Image (tube, coloured by chain):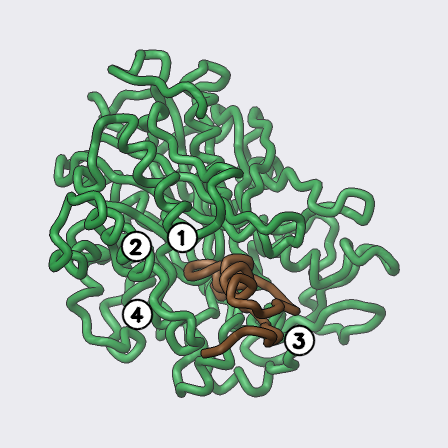
Amino acid sequence: MKLDGKKVIALGERDGVPGPAIAECVRSAGAEPVFVETECFV
Amino acid sequence: MGRNVRGPVPELMSAAVHSCSLVLAHAPDLVRHGSKPTREDAAEQIAPRLRTFEEALGYPPHQVFLGNLRPEALWEIERPWWGHPVEAPREGPFGVFVDEEELYRRLEAADQFQLLRLDGREAADGSLPIYRNGDRAGVMLRAHDLDESLSASVLLENLACKATGALALEHLLARTGFPADELQYVIGSGEEAVGDRYQRGGGNLGKAIAEQAGCVNASGSDVKAFCAGPIHALVVAGSLVSAGVYDHVAVVAGGSLAKLGMKFAGALRHDVPVLEDVLAGLAILVGPPGDGAPTFRLDAVGRHRVGSGSAQQAVLEDLVVEPLERLGRKITDVERFATELHDPEITEPAGAGNVPQRNYKLMGALAVRRGEIPRDQLDAFEREHGLPGFSPTQGHVASAVPWLPHGLEALRTGEIGSTMLVAKGSLFLGRMTELADGMSILLEPGKE
């Protein structure tokens, strides 16, 4: 998947990968996180 | 890094968990007032899939909660558990399950400002309609016409927490025979925000619960840490006792009304009953060592540090590995870990998976990485060192504590040599930090 130049919505999960970690990953691949959140589903 | 205490635990640093009570209150007519059902205006949709009291009683995870079944028994009961009811006494060795009629009686008894009026009146002026057996029964009044913190829905949430917390504390006192007037301090560890608009979340529901349970010589306060609150509170309680500030401290928490019916949509989509129809409560008695009561290892408290980051591996390194390393122990030296024990039959239909299983997989993976177990033993870690989820999804109540009375018994009989309670909290939900949180505490057999 090419992320360079894409805008990304990063939804993290508290028992999985947090939103900011996803954002950091996609940023390093050239994408722009436009919304970052971590949710708790319990 | 802070200084670590090594070597034998000095006598001063000692406190014991003498007992733990867990209670359930069936609240099908309050599910409509949960946060999600309210926002989705879903009362009519939900009504056909609410359980009767008998159905809720016979639900195997609830009987584990009360202590009539061992947690491991759930691994042997065919899923779905809701389709395989078990023998269903209202009381167990660890707690009691009250029906909605008794819950309403307790809500009224806990309501010093007479805001809950079950006299058949219609809702008006910001009051909230209250139902009984599906029919209108009365209202919850608001306490102020402009203050959102004193709205009917917030007050009902707080009152539900107070009443179920008091039910748990009363059960604890009755079960242990500990005189109510000898309890010195009560720490509330729930997640509700008690206060008016000038001090939203001001709290001290701990003291209100102490009063409700007749603990006239107790004072109290609250320890707030999202779902990790009870474990933080246990560490504080153990520290207060070991320091000699108080002889006995109770940690309490009532149920979370806001979370009733939270995942109803997933349940309806999968044709599963709405299992989030119970409020839960807990009460734990902490005192000096003796009487065989399992003791805290206050020199091996695990804390998630600000600088550790919120990745799951970092959280579990802080909570599990670091405190055990301080004692020169391995992960596999702990017979039983209790993590967040959310019932998977509630979380799976909502797409949230099996929360305890996921946590045990992560712990097992840490053990593999450290060379403590071979990779092919990873799947076995859950059953050898973990537990099935059996707690209602009541936030702080589900965080490790439902195992505590089972664990205390296993430590007293010598069935296990140590157990670790591990709790996590989602601080980021409050938008004040991106951080997660967590706390852990190790328990060992006590002295006679």
Residue drawn at (64%, 38%) of the image: B204
Residue B312: mark: 1
For the residues labelled 1 and 4, the Cα–Cα distance comes to 35 Å
> What hue does chain A carry in this figure?
brown
Left or right of A34? Residue B276 is left
| Residue B402 place in picture, x, y as percent | 35, 50
Instruction: Please check whether the numbered discs 1 and 2 fall on a single chain.
Output: yes
Chain of the residue where label 3 is placed in the rendered structure = B
Q: Nearer the viewer, residue A23 or B177?
A: A23
Give the mark toward the camera: 2 or 3: 2
Please, what secondary structure does the residue beneath circle 2 have? helix
Q: Residue at x 56, y 36 (%)?
A: B210
Name the residue type under label 2.
Leu
Farthest residue in the top direction?
B11
* Discs 1 and 4 share one subunit: yes
| Chain letter, green in picture | B
| Residue A26 numbered mark, or none | none
